[in-house]
Image (tube, grey):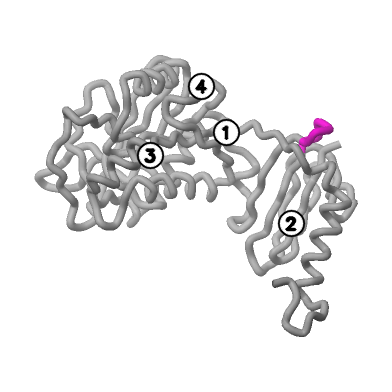
Amino acid sequence: GVLSHDLQPNRTYAEVSRVAEELKRLGQQLVNLKKDNQVAILFSADSANALSYMPYSDHADYMTTLQQMYGALYDLNVEPDFVAAGDASLSRYKVLLVPPLYSASDGILQQLCDFVKNGGQVVMAFKSGFTNEFSQEFTNLPEPERLAPDAYGVGDQNKGAIWEEFLIPDTAEVIASFDDPYWKFPAITRNHYGNGILTYEGTVVSDSLQCEIVREVLKRAGLTGSDQTLPATVKVRHGRNAQGKLLHYYLNFSGEEQSFPYPYGNGSDLLTDTSLRVGQALKLKPWDLAIVAEQ
């Protein structure tokens, strides 16, 4: 609880009181925040359930790949939406990350094709596009397999594990293949279609490799900038409040003070009521935050 057994105010009580005071003072400026995310993760309950029923590994499943993709975006300070497969229009997004889409209707696959054709960027994980009539015997990789070349510059993390698809590219460009004397199948491919590009992962890539794949796709979509140059422990989230003002939440997830140039429009830190100009150093105390409202 907030109070200890002696029922006397303590450090926890003081922190809760501080937060309550800040919410009371700033609440009207923070509520009804509207988001305009340009990246989405496609979630397929059918695929998650199918792969749970017919697992391909004891160490990885649908959710581990989804969490890895989200983790790459989190590390790169990019906010995604989650959209259900087949339920939402994708046209508002520039980038779409697709965990293993094992079970999908023709309508869902056509929706993805149209998204790429119209200029979207897609990262699609292995075991996508399978349906019941195309089921095949599952085989696992006993050890992580090195890929070649090291197209994303991740060194020792340039590996695929657990699952290897025997991809035969037609119009797709091979980005990296399994570095095996006998099984030199593509592991990562990139296919241009219409005005967009689909990047396909034919294996379970390492976390570092996933992050760099996503980073490259975000760059191609024009979605990288100052947020990706922040200190690794500083995360930022954006939104527009009910008064139409842009808010930028900076959170320091570390025990050290962090400082970086503030990159957005002139504004003020709502918590400290101090003005902030473009390029001015924004300092965050350990485990602290700033909420900057643009003027």
Location of mark 2 (residue):
289
Quadrant where the C terminus sits is top right
Q: CA distance from mark 3 to mark 2?
A: 32 Å
**Residue type (three-letter) at the residue carrying disc 4:** Ser
**Residue type (three-letter) at the residue carrying disc 3:** Pro
Q: Measuring from the top left, give residue 194's x and y in whole percent.
A: 40, 15
Q: Nearer the viewer, mark 3 or mark 1?
A: 3
**Residue type (three-letter) at the residue carrying disc 2:** Leu
Res. 183 image quadrant: top left
Residue drawn at point x = 27 percent, y = 29 percent: 129
- Which stretch did the figure color magenta? 241-246
Give the crowd class for mark 3: few <14, some 14-19, many >=20 residues within 10 Å: many
Q: Secondary structure at mark 1?
A: loop
Closer to the chain start, of discs 4 and 3, is 4
Quadrant where the N terminus sits is bottom right
Q: Nearer the viewer, mark 1 or mark 4?
A: 4
Q: Nearer the viewer, mark 1 or mark 2?
A: 2
Closer to the chain start, of discs 4 and 2, is 4
Q: CA distance from mark 4 to mark 2?
A: 34 Å
